[in-house]
Amino acid sequence: MNRTTLSLIAGTTALAAVTGFAALSAPDATGTETPAKPAAQLPVERTSLLCPAPSTSDIAETTYTSFTPVTEGTGSGGKAHLRAAAEKPADDPAAGDGKGKGGEDGPAADKGGGSSDAGDAGKPALTPKEPGKPVTGDTSGPDAPALVGTADGRFAPGWTLQETTEVAAGTGRGLQGVTCTAPDTDFWFPGAATTPDRTDYVHLTNPDDSAAVVDIELYGKDGLIESEVGEGITVPPHSSEPVLLSTLADAGRTDLTVHVNVRSGRVGAAVQALDDKIGGDWLAASADPSGSLVLPGIPKDATEVRLVAFAPGEADADLKVRLASPSGLITPAGHETVHVKGGMTTAVDLGDVTRGEAGSLVLTPTQQSVPVVAAVRVVRGKGDRQETAFIPATRPVGTRATSADNRAKGSTLSLTAPGRAATVKVTASAGSEGGTPVSKTYTIKAGTTQDIEPPLPGGLKGTYALTVEPVSGGPVHGARTLTAAQDGVPAFTVQTLPDDRGTVAVPEAEQDLSVLQD
């Protein structure tokens, strides 16, 4: 017999880098199957992020903040760029030498941070210089485009981009913030509306060289809203399409769940929900449908909290509603449970449920577990001085979570341990214009939420980033609230803190698999 040896080590490693997991087993000398060693967690080597066009307001002021945590094992190479969606990446041969018009270098942000014009053709909005130090760039007005970012090498693990916009007046006035997202194929957004006082868009950004085809479905209190307009929407290569939700459904629809399903290709998706009277913000996608959900970081001075939930499929969901407060899990009076009919959106007004204390909603099944998605709309202030933000259900922090845009004043970190107690390490990075990192450890008691005034970097200048790393105990969910007073309006925005995708599981393949041939 001829014996041909086929080595699968390289192929298996490549597969793991793409899928995030893999498993191998091979017979040993005695013919007994021996399981492979557990997968190792290695830094990701490349990632991409998409930022929606920030605003159509003439008086919008937008700041982009880029940050990559320092990660062991990444080496010294790599780069990161953030460019207008219509621009080709710097490593594309058709993109030229990567310089702007007239052969000039990129904006001030390329030189270590500062102002930039994200709309100038050929100029990157941001080019980070080193992990561990944030870089910022600014733009203003209604013409700022959607942005596409790519990072590799030492800049890829945990790369985080934050888009923060201040609008002083008009529809959606206040503070609007969104964490730029990785491209994907499926998104759920509970909490949209098409009422006369709301202007809600779903922004679709395609980073690839081929067109993406997208279906947008809307679900109200009576189920799917029939519409052919949302079927087969084409998003051209390297472009972004804002779709006005009122064109997909009759006006006057409240508490809608938006489902973005990508037939071919991939996109980044986010909903911009703007109100004529009480401000507005970005509604990020909910965590994937699950039987239990955590919605962390409801501000303690929230005056109105509205829960919106949706159960994909035909099965109904009965959920126990609890608030993780600083002293433990409590049940809101009159809102012990919520019944969500399959395929229909349900909304519940919880009022000022936090009552002046830190809080997070914890939703668990009363009996049989049925997958659901959920978000809350939060209002601060009263009368004509109100502002709105959204908090979707989010995954646990995982290995590490990152918040990119924090200021010396106005940042609050909210951490929740819905099950067992947990200990976490919080690190404040160097400032974008100077400062030294600082770390501090916190213990979150079981079933509680703790609002933390984050540690400040020593000698802070500019903005800084926060990383949260579990040390021991049970799962932790987190959110960051950023506030800014605007003529008496308590402007704010909340971003949840899921795992920052810094590592991928790669199996250790030590043996060659052999094929015997006659």
Image (cartoon, helix red, strand yellow):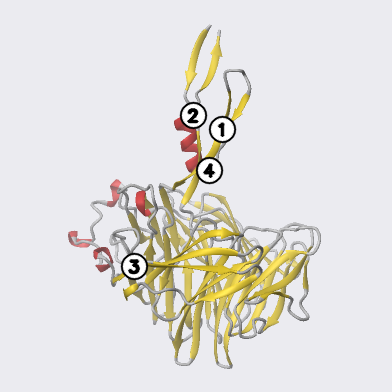
Dot 1 or dot 3: first in sequence order is 1
Residue 245 in view in this figure: no
Asked which quadrant contains residue 216, the reply is bottom right
Q: Residue at x 32, y 50 (%)?
A: 78
Dot 2 or dot 4: first in sequence order is 4
Residue position marked by numbered label 3 in the rendering? 430
Dot 4 or dot 1: first in sequence order is 4
Residue position marked by numbered label 4 in the rendering? 19
Residue position marked by numbered label 2 in the rendering? 510
Disc 1 crowd, CA 10 A, few/some/many (<14, 14-19, 20+): some
Disc 4 crowd, CA 10 A, few/some/many (<14, 14-19, 20+): few
Amino acid, disc 2: Glu
Mark 1–mark 2 contact, CB under 8 Å? yes
Q: Residue at x 78, y 75 (%)?
A: 336
Amino acid, disc 3: Ala
Amino acid, disc 1: Ala
Residue position marked by numbered label 1 in the rendering? 36
What is the distance, in whole Å, between disc 1 and disc 2 at their CAs?
8 Å
What is the distance, in whole Å, between disc 4 and disc 3 at their CAs?
33 Å
Disc 1 is placed on an element classified as loop
Given this view, does label 4 or label 1 mark the residue nearer the observer? 1
**Vertical order, 118 against 491 (above or below):** above
Disc 4 is placed on an element classified as helix
Q: Residue furthest right?
A: 367
Quarter holding the C terminus is top right
Asked which quadrant contains residue 81, the reply is bottom left
Q: Residue at x 37, y 57 (%)?
A: 70
